Amino acid sequence: MPMQFLPFLIVIALGMPLARPASSEPQRPALPGQGRILFAAARGDNGAFDIFSADLAGERAANLTADPYPDRSPSWSPDANHVVFASRRGDNWDLYVMRADGSDLRRLTNHPAYDGEPSWSPDGRRVAFTSMRDGNPEIYTLDLIGGDARRITSHPAADAQPTWSPDGRLIAFTSWRDGNQEIYIADAESGAVINLTNHPAPDHSPAWSPDGGRIAFISDRDGGGNLHIRDLITGEELRAGPDNLGLRDPAWTPGGGLMAVAPWALGGRRFFSRQGVALFSPGMPGGTFVVASLHGYADPSWSNRAVTPLLPDERWLEGRSFDATAPPVDVASLPRGMVALGDVRAGGIPALAAAVKPSFDALRRDVIEASGYDFLGQLSEASRAVDFQNGTSSFTSWHKAGRAFDTRWDYRVNGQQILYISPEWRAGRLFWRLYLRTSRQDGSMGEPLTAPVFDVQNRRLLPPPAGYFVDFTALAAAHGWNRIAAQERDTFDWRTQLLALEYWHFERRDGLSWYQAMRLVHDDQTLERIFTIERVLEAGARPQFFPFLGLPWAQLPPPVAGPISLPMGRRQ
């Protein structure tokens, strides 16, 4: 459909005028340093997501929830005096509200099914949210005065990620109802919907601009995780931020700028697991971080009415924590040798390094508790012989150091598929996120899956399956086990070769170089005999990685210093 017809389609389909609405109450100007941003981050003591707020200088972040339960999707009230969010307290996802300093916590919903992703209406009277109370994800609104929940969408496909128009009459959301992830707009009263994006690539995470005339969203249409802006009046599109870095969870600033969760780099090097909340300008490829650290981030929002909360010192953290150099690892204090996996069946050598075996055991227990399944009771592979070599695996593999394991490629119980994988683009590289369908599907375990899943056999994306799932990748990371990127070499590429997908591989490095880790489980004479420069080159190892492996004959790179910055992609 030609873009110039889009405004008329919205008018006809939803039966209301589309304009850039003026606010019904005076707005304070969004000056630099004014107001606060709200976000969720895995910076709590136990690694669970908590709700934080920070000022625009980003120097300190206030932990508003500070509890062992996962808290997500915070949303400001219009006056910024309260925050609504989702939490899995009591082993069930429900909506909660608290004051902006974290006090006076109250539960808003109490339903055995999942309630999450709340968005506070501009008039302060309702909260839009995603719920599984009718069997699959749908958009609901909750009347904050009467407490009544009203279903807005009704479709067998998943509807999620609601966001209000500034006049409170429309709700944008993500849906799979046309067999593809798209942005839709619904009338908050009648429930009439239209497809806004209508593109074969995934479009998701809508955010409505303060002037009502634009919607920002994340799309994979010309790369991976790019920030797009659609003008609802003209149909024109802009981009914001760098290319193909896997940006997530966009939100608008009061002055018409944008925020999103982004990966960050230190001194020009890329660290894909490090994240923060960055500010962007429409049409510009750069960005500036407000908060950032080694942890996961999600769901930022900015209110220029919010004020600094009064909290004790222990509830404050550094807003930007990015030390240039990590403290040296005390290698001498680490246990040496390998430890057998016990009752875990595994290909290769069924053992792990003694230093990491306890964290594997703890992860296995947590996976059983969270999903109801012993997913790690059998592995495709654990450790490898020190001289193992073939045409597809690295000669300097972390399997040889006893610090890597490969999960099962497929996992089914009584014929039902339990393991699902979903693609994520980070800094131009393809990573995978593993999800496990929980044994109990009553809402007491896991949460709905809204990301697309990858059909390995047919090499295509599919809509998320219905039900409740546990994020295995997040559990593994909490125990120090991290994923690697899919392979994209000329002779070994994930697009054509199954083994190059690498979604099953997890490793734990703990700040050690590969050679340091190897010396903890093998004797020096063996290592010096096998890992000569000639043998390593002959095995196909790439010389640019030699210094980072810690090989004794390779020169170490100089320490990296400098502030965090966004890795810059190439605008296509």
Image (cartoon, rainbow, N blue to C red):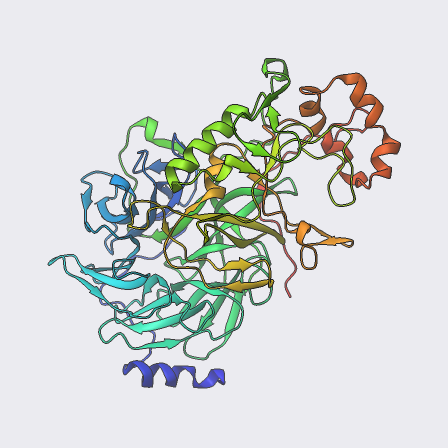
Could you tell me which residue is drawn at 33 percent across and 31 percent down?
315
State whether residue 181 is above or below residue 111: below
Tell me residue 268's x, y (percent). 66, 43
Tell me residue 172's x, y (percent). 35, 68
State whether residue 110 is above or below residue 367: below
Q: Is residue 453 left or right of residue 402?
A: left
| Quarter residue 380 falls in | top right
Q: Is residue 19 left or right of residue 215?
A: left
Could you tell me which residue is drawn at 23 percent across and 76 percent down?
190
- For residue 97, say whether it is visible: yes
Q: Is residue 379 left or right of residue 519?
A: left
Q: Nearer the viewer, residue 252 or 412?
A: 412
- Please state the total of marks drawn on the protein image: 0
Could you tell me which residue is drawn at 67 percent across and 24 percent down?
517
Furthest-left residue in view? Answer: 146
Tell me residue 382's x, y (percent). 62, 33
Q: Nearer the viewer, residue 394 or 545?
A: 394
| Quarter residue 178 falls in | bottom left
Furthest-top residue in view? Answer: 332
Could you tell me which residue is drawn at 33 percent across and 79 percent down?
18
Q: Nearer the viewer, residue 138 or 174?
A: 138
- State which quarter of the image contains the C terminus: bottom right
Furthest-front residue in view? Answer: 414
- For residue 320, say whether it is visible: no
| Quarter residue 226 falls in | bottom right
Tell me residue 538's x, y (percent). 87, 38
Q: Is residue 428 left or right of residue 468?
A: right
